[in-house]
Amino acid sequence: MSFSKKGNKPSPFIVFDIGSASVGAALALAPNGKQVPQIIYSTRVPIVAKNSRDHSRFISAMLSALKNVATDIEQDGIQKLSDNKLNAKDIKNIFCVMSSSWHKSSIEVFKKREEKPFIVSSKFISNMLENADEQFLESIKNQPDNKKIINPRFIEKNIIKILLNGYNTNEPKGKKVNSMDVALFMSVISGEVSEKIENILEKIFSVNSVSFHTFALSAFSVVRDIFSTEENFLLMDISGETTGITLVRNETMVKDVDLPLGKNFLIEKVASSLGTMHEEAHSLIRLFLEGKSISSETVKIEKVLVEAREEWLASFRKVLADFSDGLSLPKTIFLTIDTDIGKWFVDTIKSDEFSAHTLARQPFTIVELGSRILSKHCSVSQESPKGCDTFLGIDVIFANKIANE
């Protein structure tokens, strides 16, 4: 996939960020020369599902939100193209970036050791990885019914690192070595879900390609490019339903896991304890974190949040214990999260004693991937005073990168 540029015109493309709490969309321009991609219009709507554990209704709610943002782009976003002497027919590519609620992924390292040197070739690497698909699909079949992907469709099968005789290389072919390690990232989504997404988008837009990607790989790729000196770190994506955590060692994704405890976990705790609706609980948490809650509610909310902190940290500690595997953990955490109640999660992570097990024996350093950082790599229209939507910004940077590789 690539962007076709005519003369000096930038190429428009659309990115859909399909999460577990909302669906966002950005109409962007691929740059010419050394410029960064520009978001000229963006929108986001919540996924209105009373119970995300009712998977069929959750899918329907997501598709409804997707249709709404796609229609918004069609009705209000497309007209922004005229400022660049472009129109809807110039849009050729759509990228759908899926959160962990919609896909299953796996990171596997395949190793080859020989006493006599062997020459690395494309065929040799393919032979090493020939059973990877079947092994991954078999592992999905063995998962509990509520975690299965029905009719899985591969969307990513990316080699993220190759070591020859223990050394990293981007050009392995033709090299004579005794050992080779290949790190492979694979992901699948439901064939039924992907087909319904394509049907909605193809009815609204006339495009050459609708491609699917995972937010985990997108964020890893963007962070690795922006923070090129960081070789070891944790990636955390706290979305509506889940907290995705990825361990990166020596610039390679090593392990990833999803906790079923995202932003909605916190909101539901408060809603249940105070006997209120989801939306009101969300508002009460925001006011509490801003120090604006009324005194009669402050004590109640604080008690609930303390209990929620212990429950969330218990799961977080188990993940970190598995990740450490006897080794020190990276000190830096790159975090993506909505800003409204992100402070609670940041303070919770910093408060935990597990940070004493980092490489530097110091508390975690948390880098929030927000507008301030992303603005250097993705510009937004002056009509967007709040700056760049973190998730859409990462998606657009990633989409622009892979389209030009």
Image (cartoon, rainbow, N blue to C red):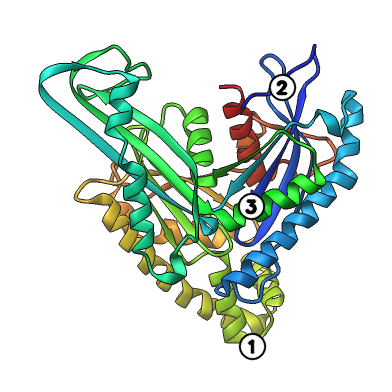
Q: Which percent across, then down, holds residue 360?
A: 29, 41
What crowding class fits label 3: few (fewer than 14 Cα within 10 Å), some (14-19), or many (20 or more)?
few
Which of the two discs, 3 and 1, labels the residue nearer the N terminus? Answer: 3
Measure how far apart labels 3 and 2 are at the Cα level.
30 Å
x and y percentages locating residue 275 in the rendered image: 64, 88
Furthest residue in direction left, as rendered: 115
Q: Secondary structure at mark 3?
A: helix
Please tell me in which quadrant of the rendered image residue 51 appears.
bottom right
User: Residue shown at 38%/58% (left/top)?
Assistant: 140
Q: CA distance from mark 1 to mark 2?
A: 50 Å
| Label located before the other in sequence (1 or 2) | 2
**Residue 195 marker:** 3
Report which residue position mark 1 lands on.
275
At mark 1, the secondary structure is loop
Name which residue type carries label 1. Answer: Gly
Residue at image x 66%, y 16%?
A: 34
Q: Secondary structure at mark 2?
A: loop
Residue 396 or 287: which is nearer the viewer?
A: 396
Q: Where residue 94 sits in the image (x, y, percent)? A: 69, 38
Q: Which residue is mark 2?
A: 31
The C terminus sits in image quarter = top right
